[in-house]
Image: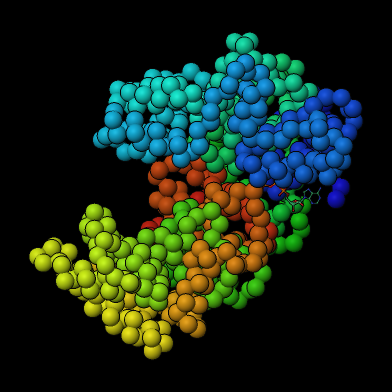
Amino acid sequence: MELNPYQERAVTVAGHCTILACPGSGKTRVLSERAARLLANHPKGRLCAVTFTRDAAEELRSRILASCGQEHARRLAVGTFHSLALAQIKRFSRGKPPRLLSEGERLAVLRRCCKQHAPDLPFDDVVQAIDAVKARLAPSPFTDPSLEAVFRSYQDIMESEGAMDFADLLLLSVRRMARGDMPPLPIRWLLVDEAQDMDEVQMEWILLHGRAGAEVTLVGDDDQSLYAFRHALGYAGLREITFALSATETTLPVNYRCAPNILGHAARLIAHNRERAPKRIEAHRQDAGEVHVIRAADRWDEAGQCVDRIRLDGSQWAVLARTNLLLDPVEVCLTEARIPYRRCGGQSVWDRALGATFLGLLRSVLDGAWTGVANALAFCGMPADQVNRLASFPGRDCLERLRAATRHIGSDADGPLIVSLLQGFEAWTTQARMQRHALVIHAVASWLSSHCKPDQARLLGRLEAALAGLSGHLARRLSLVGGSGNRQTPADSVAVMTLHASKGLEFDNVWILGCEDGNLPHTDSTEEDERRLLYVGMTRARHRLILSSAIEEGLESRFLEEAGLA
Ligand SMILES: Nc1ncnc2c1ncn2[C@@H]1O[C@H](COP(=O)(O)OP(=O)(O)OP(=O)(O)O)[C@@H](O)[C@H]1O
């Protein structure tokens, strides 16, 4: 595959450079080719490439070496900001470097501090506030004194334990380099992928390397900046660092992925954003694609229409939505239609509370395990200590334990719940022994439904129908759904994921659900962020793009009008 003239220029331009790319323009290809040529053309000098995930680092490393040859591997380092900063600290620290906290440990320590100093604040808000402070070089003080107390005690605990978290690692590296206590990595070239996603501290780490003599290459697309909520600087960051390094700007305007009409609508949409680099977008493809807008009655009608369309056409599909929850009806309809799918990045509807409780109860009917029963009792509102107490009743299986529990309930508030579950269980196990699988599925769903809220009951009805529609023994049906069923699906199955998770991917056909005002754009975020999110989703499609909304959920998204699709 030959490089186009824009790609060739981006690969060969000398000195610091910022490559502003459009979607589908071959960013990774350009970055890996530039790195490969630098290594191959200069027998001395180390090259370091930075990515935002370990997977991306591995892929970039193998593409660079495939292009320039394994003999250059010793002069190449590819990693995330944090892994490179850790290597730097280990290499240049006297004494033992601090221990890095895992994400689980970090949250556990924070939870402890939060309980002590800010028991009334929502934990997620506290985590967000502390992350925000650590993504800044000169953070503004906390306005809430209890947040300040959580932050101080968290930092004290880490210091006393000789530990640090990921954010501190990069801050430490930047501060020590700025003070002259630690040298930058000894590299001649520094290449940064997805540079629109860097935060202030990451930008400073790059700048310190650039000022120390490393030639910096940044590749990014400000229109695909989706992580403002994680303090990504987006276009403002790209502009600032380009100016600070006097980097040469170059662009990759040719999109190889999308049919021209798909790209045209996406470009019209993103043109409404003000905070963006001025750049052209050109379609390389000449064949017309398909773009459709669909208005369904409600979420289930929307999901049904989507799955009917997928059933008609066996080519590659992705179904995208702003949140994971919006994808549940489609997952259920795909199960009903027996179309293989994979839920990428998010939890399956079968693994979330309602689905897992339903499947767990059915499993207990088959194998007598107590877990499914205990989870069902908890789901129906029984306090956790009470559920745990029941586990101490004797019994070889859950039926015997339920009988023993029923004999001891006396005037317990939860007595009727236990009795009704026991009665149900006795009937279900009898039916299961007689191989009446559909009947068991229906009876268990009915019991659970009587303890659900109305919207849960509606979802449960569909889960029941999906499971009843599968054929074979109950055990086989249970193995086909949820996490276990998903693991066996082929790579060309329907990809079901959020718009965020779709970044960097491409598909022949893309269906974007939930295009209503209030959902996309969502009020949780800025309009420009939301527009970028839809733009990323639209530019995943090679040939066919379908955007749908549900009348019951509100007006059609104003973004469709902006994209020329009203
Ligand atoms: N010079 C070229 N000639 C033909 N096809 C190309 C060329 N450069 C890239 N492509 C193809 O364009 C498609 C998009 O490339 P790639 O996925 O690397 O783009 P990207 O810029 O990373 O996209 P995005 O930012 O939207 O995720 C790929 O299928 C790739 O093979």
* Horizontal arrangement in the rendering, residue 143 relative to residue 67 (left or right): left
Instruction: Name which residue lies at 25% across and 35% down.
Output: 120
* Horizontal arrangement in the rendering, residue 18 relative to residue 201 (left or right): right
The correct choice, above or below, for 384 with respect to 33 in the image is below
Instruction: Name which residue lies at 26% across and 67% down.
Output: 394
Instruction: Name which residue lies at 53% across and 28% down.
Output: 99
Q: Nearer the viewer, residue 210 or 429?
A: 429
Q: Residue furthest top?
A: 180
Q: Nearer the viewer, residue 367 or 127?
A: 367
Mark yes or no: residue 200 visible: no
Q: Nearer the viewer, residue 344 or 186?
A: 186
The correct choice, above or below, for 450 with respect to 326 in the image is below
Where's residue 512, x and y in %? 53, 59
Q: Residue furthest left?
A: 411
Where's residue 253, x and y in %? 73, 42
Where's residue 73, x and y in %? 81, 36
